[in-house]
Structures are given as structure tokens and as C-alpha cells.
Amino acid sequence: MNIDYRLKFALFLILAAIVFFMFKANNIFENKIVTHQSKSITFKDDTKPIQIGSTDETTYKIKKGDTFYSLLKQLKINPLLINKIVNDENLNSFKTLLPGNEIIFSNIGKKIFLKKFDGKSAVDLMEISGDRFKLKKLTNLNSYVAFKEYKIERSLYESALKAEVPNNIIDELMIVFGWDIDFVFDVRVGDKVKVLYKEFYLEGRLLGNSDILAATFINNGKEFSVFRFTQQGVKDYFSADGKSVKKSFLKTPIEFAAITSPYNLKRKHPILNTIRPHTGTDYRGKTGTPVKVTGDGIVVRANFSNSYGNIIDVKHFNKYLTRYAHLNNFERSIKVGSRVKQGQVIGYVGSTGLATGPHLHYEFRINGKHTNPVNVSMPDAQPINQYNKAAFNKVTKERIGLINNLSSI
Ligand SMILES: [Zn+2]
């Protein structure tokens, strides 16, 4: 066998493998899907002994209470070796088992193989033989771009599950679109969601999926799209024009503001004279000074309270809420359900409720918890920088093209 012949034979093998995997993966998809990601398959000498596909494999789904130790014990591995394995710090990612994770077992001769998807793009493989074990990473997974789309029927979550969108993708959809779409107020029956992500296969077996590559949400006829892009080593989501999907807040709700009473959980209340935490920041201002909402959102409260006086609460994307209290009066258009834009005037400084003088009491809540607005670390909402612009535009164009080609709703 001369070198030339071996080379041809190797090429033939590679081609055959590619065709085989394409065919196999195609059959797996029931939903419409599938574009083939070119992925070079390399045959290295050291991967040769691992022809696991030809033997019986058992997949074990991790249940609550399972430990790596208990799994190895079931495999009847000698206790000394089990100890060695569970105490090896290099194996931490392999040993961390979460309910729902899958471990694939197989035997070849006297060797035991355990495979686990690393959650990203490789499989950790442990080979146990006699009283030894070794670990390697299999990176030659087949990855395919998966496409899912669905219309919202009853709830966002239910519709996504019905369309067989993986759980981590559903969670991510809520986060990346949560900056623009309020899932309580905005979502309508008939809204459409389209999403691209990658699925990883090893020998025809689906191991897991990536995060979102691109997604489109058509909300009440208005289209929002997000694209994943890594900039300066940080993965983030951007709209097609390169803006981060994250939104930031204005630093202060009134101009030229001076803080008169800072956030203080042990403050003595100036009128009640009791220790009452001050869960906001007071800004001095003349009666009638315009108060600006610090971020885009929806007014969820606009009424009078004995202590807060005229009060407005604004709910922002995902998990943020801001409060504006002791207002002299509201801007005319403001009522519960009003949609407000960052910087929009929503009311005017006053001294209604329990207030010693005209000031604005401003609160910032994250997930319902009071947070000192002065110290809140805001999401970093950097846009795509000029160096990445061309690459970003290329990726965006490809992905939106793919979504449009695959979509039929
Ligand atoms: Zn206050």
C-alpha cells in the first residue's frame, strides 16, 4: 500500500463518514430544520480505540440524589479506584452531575467507557481499565444548526415546549427579548418566535445544544431580532444595528439633582421619628421640577398613598422596577399601563405624603428587592465596536437569511 493510495483511502473514509452523519442527523429531525455546519472530522491515532458506536451503549439519565460515586459503584468498579477517581480534582467538570444530565456507558473488552457532554461543544470521555483510568475530550462532535419556530397560543412557555425548544433556549429567549418585550403586558396570541441554535451529536446521538445564535420575536406585528456575537472575549446579544439588547438606566431622574437623604437601612424617619429604613434616594428639587423616568418601561402604579404621596412605579424589562414618590402631580398622559420612554417626563417634584419638604424619593428594585440606586451596577450595554462591525454584519446577514429561508409561519 503506497502513501498515495492510503491518502485516497483516508479521504474516502472521511467523505463516507460525513455523508453518513448527515443522513443520520437528517433522520433525527422531525421538525423542519437543518443546515449542515461544515465540521472537519479528523481521525487521530489516539482516537482509534474508541469505536464505541459498534458496542452496546447504555444511557443513564441522572436523577436527584445520584452521585458520581454511586454511579461508579453500580458499575462494580473496584473501591480503591472509585476513591481515586472521586478525589481527582481534574475531574470536577465530569463529576458534577445535575439531574437530567446523561452519562453514556459502554464496555469494550475489559474497558469501561463513560461519556458526558461538557455542555458546550465537546464530550468528556473516561476510560476505565483495570485499576487505571484516563480522561480525554472528544471534540470531533458533529454540530448542526437547528431551527425552531412557533406561534404563541396560550403561554410563551407552553408554546415553546410544544415546539420542542430545549429548556435552556426557552430561558434564554426570555432574557434576550425581555429587554424589549414585557412578557406580562406585551405578549399576544399569534406572536411568533423563530430561533437558531446548534445541536451537538456524537455518532448520531444528540448530546445537547448551544445557546441562541439568532432569534426573532414578532410581537404584535413588530419584529425584534437578536444575534449572538462575541466581542473582546465576551459573548453578548445585539440587535441587527449592532446595539446591545441590554438597556441602561439614566443615572438620576431629575437634572442637577442633589441627594439629601441617601439609601440607608437604619435611618430615623424625619416625621415619624422612628427607625425606618430608607430604601431609596431623596433628591432635592423645587416643587414642579420635572421628573424623568430612568428607563423604558410600563407604568404599573400611579396613585396616591398616605406615606408616599403621589407615587409612580415603572416596571422595566426583565427584573427592574423604579419608583418615584412625593410627586406634586403626574404628567397628564401617565396612568397604569402607559408605556414610557427613557427620559420622558412622568411627573413633577412635590411634597405629598409623609415629606418634610419638596423632594423626589426614588427607588430602584431588582427582582422586587430594594437596591441602592446610586450603587446599582448597570448592565454593560456596549454596542458592536468599529473593528467588529464588518464581521458582525456578515454573521447577522447570514443568520437572518437562514431564518427567513427556513421560516414558514
Ligand atoms: Zn425618601
Image (cartoon, rainbow, N blue to C red):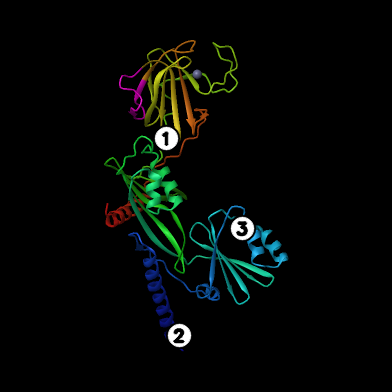
Q: Quadrant of residue 136?
A: bottom right
Q: Residue at x 37, y 53 (%)?
A: 163
Q: Which residue is drawn at 44% across and 84% down?
A: 6
Q: Check if mark 3's residue and mark 2's residue have beta carbons within 8 Å.
A: no
Say which mark, if any, is on residue 95. 3
Q: Where is residue 228 in the image (x, y as percent from the top left)?
A: 40, 50
Q: Main secondary structure of the magenta part?
A: loop
Q: How far apart are marks 3 and 2 (CA)?
A: 43 Å
Q: Where is residue 11 in the image (x, y as percent from the top left)?
A: 41, 78
In the picture of the structure, the residue carrying the numbered disc 1 is 248
Q: What element carries label 2?
A: helix
Graded by Cα atoms within 10 Å as few (under 14), some (14 to 19) or many (20 or more), the crowding at tag 2 reads: few
Observer-nearest of 59 and 228: 59
Q: Quadrant of residue 327?
A: top left
Graded by Cα atoms within 10 Å as few (under 14), some (14 to 19) or many (20 or more), the crowding at tag 3 reads: some
- Give, as a single range, the part of the protein colored magenta: 330-346
Residue type at mark 1: give it: Ser
Q: Residue at x 52, y 63 (%)?
A: 123
Say which mark, if any, is on residue 3. 2
The answer to whether 131 is drawn above or below residue 260 in the figure is below
Q: What element carries label 3?
A: helix
Query: Is residue 275 highlighted in magenta?
Result: no
Which sits earlier in the primary sequence, circle 1 or circle 3? Answer: 3
